[in-house]
Image: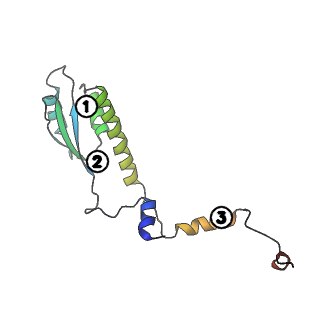
Amino acid sequence: MRRETAYKLAGRNHDHPVAGAGLRKEREIRFTKLPPGQAERALQSLRMLKGLRVERGEGDRSLSIFYNVLDYSQEMVEDALRDAGFHLDNSLYMKLVRALVYFCEETQRHNLESPERLIKKSNEVYIQVYDQHPHGDHDDTPPEFREYK
């Protein structure tokens, strides 16, 4: 097996131009119409968090947040806003987007925190396990009896 094929099967990707690429995230948070002025109050509140950059969004009811996925996640930020009494947009579209973003960020964090798999001698592990268990390929008959003519 070629090394490139083994790396692909192991999930390794060495084509990143920068180590840790894809860790910086930009997300949008939308608020409901009522009560008015939520986005401005949330902007002031979120600016106090270190490592989280917040800007006004395209509309008057949205914010853009920028963060490192190892420090924050959109779920953490939105849960903190809900706990502080803010009302987020709960349209079907936003629920679907949230679910997808939560899943992707959780998976990325899990993969970054788990140790990298070693594949240099992984086949030897399987060979040793295979030899320890009885299976149909072992024949205890002496060779002279197997080749009887």
Judged from the image, the secondary structure of the residue bearing numbered disc 2 is loop
User: What is the distance, in whole Å, between disc 2 and disc 1 at their CAs?
Assistant: 17 Å
- Select label 3 or label 1 by which is in front: 3
Q: Which residue is mark 2?
A: 71
Inspect the image, locate mark 3, and give the three-letter code of the amino acid beneath it: Tyr
Type of amino acid under label 2:
Asp
Q: Residue at x 59, y 64 (%)?
A: 126
**Tally of marks:** 3
Q: Which mark is residue 113?
A: none
Residue at (35%, 35%) from the top-left corner? 99
Q: Residue 146, percent across and down?
A: 82, 75
Q: Could you tell me residue 133's position as x and y percent?
A: 70, 62
Task: Return the residue nearer the eye: 149 or 144.
Answer: 149
47 to 59, vertically: above or below: below
Locate residue 135 relative to residue 25 in the image: left or right. Answer: right
> Which numbered marker is on residue 130?
3
